[in-house]
Image (spheres, grey):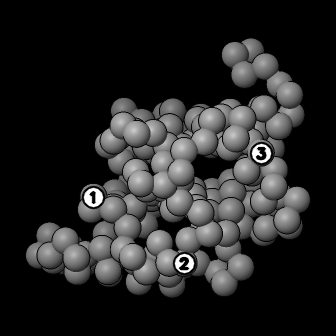
């Protein structure tokens, strides 16, 4: 199984880039992993919130394979503990999912078409995080889940 971490918008800001790269490298010891920053549509600043979300959704739907397992990060999604995320990842692996895609939406969230396509809606927290910080938290939590699955001590890494 491959893990794909997708986010809409500009590349990682310098204050999170090193952390995201570090955790992504750590994840790669367990699963093939790749970050994709999906660029904003042209003229995004001129679009309404609804039009922008729709256009972002169309772009993402075009990137997704029909068998990709899509986890849409959404503040209204279900919450999991770190152990729960580990179980979730293991279950997808046991189901022979080829690509497990975690998606962080744009500034206005995700279009309804993406929620309809999503296999799972996940909330990192009841707190709302800036998108850049959500990227770092996502990478760290996926790495933590990998260490839990291997029964490794996280703090010794």
Q: Which residue is mark 3?
A: 87
User: Considering only vertical position in the picture, is 109 above or below 146?
Assistant: below
| Left or right position of 84 against 52 | right
Residue depicted at x 83% and y 37%: 149
Q: Is residue 67 above or below residue 16?
A: below
Q: Quadrant of residue 91?
A: bottom right
Quick one: label 3, few (<14), some, or many (20+) residues within 10 Å?
some
The image shows a total of numbered marks equal to: 3
Give the structural element (helix, strand or loop) at label 3: helix
Picture coordinates of residue 132 (x, y %)? 37, 44
For label 2, the residue is: 117
3 or 1: mark nearer the eye: 3
Circles 3 and 1: CB distance less than 8 Å? Answer: no
Q: What residue sits right under mark 1 in the picture?
A: 107
Residue 143: percent from left, percent from top: 67, 37
Instruction: Estimate the x, y position of residue 126 in percent, counting from the top left.
Output: 40, 39
Quadrant placement of the N terminus: bottom right
Give the vertical position of 109 relative to 16 (above or below): below
To which quarter of the image does residue 41 belong?
A: bottom left
Task: Please give left or right for residue 69 compared with residue 46 in the image.
Answer: right
Q: Real-space Cα distance between discs 1 and 2?
A: 20 Å
The front one of 85 and 43 is: 85
């Amino acid at each position: 199984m491959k893990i794909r971490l997708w986010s809409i918008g500009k590349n990682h800001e310098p204050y999170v880039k090193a952390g995201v790269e570090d955790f992504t490298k750590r994840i790669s010891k367990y699963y093939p992993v790749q970050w994709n920053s999906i660029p904003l549509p042209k003229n995004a600043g001129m679009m309404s919130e609804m039009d922008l979300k729709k256009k972002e959704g169309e772009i993402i739907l075009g990137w997704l394979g029909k068998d990709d397992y899509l986890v849409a990060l959404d503040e209204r999604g279900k919450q999991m503990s770190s152990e729960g995320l580990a179980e979730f990842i293991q279950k997808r692996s046991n189901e022979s999912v080829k690509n497990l895609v975690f998606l962080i939406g744009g500034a206005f969230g995700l279009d309804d078409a993406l929620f309809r396509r999503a296999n799972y809606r996940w909330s990192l927290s009841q707190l709302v995080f800036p998108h850049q910080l959500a990227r770092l938290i996502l990478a760290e939590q996926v790495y933590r889940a990998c260490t839990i699955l291997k029964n490794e001590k996280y703090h010794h890494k």
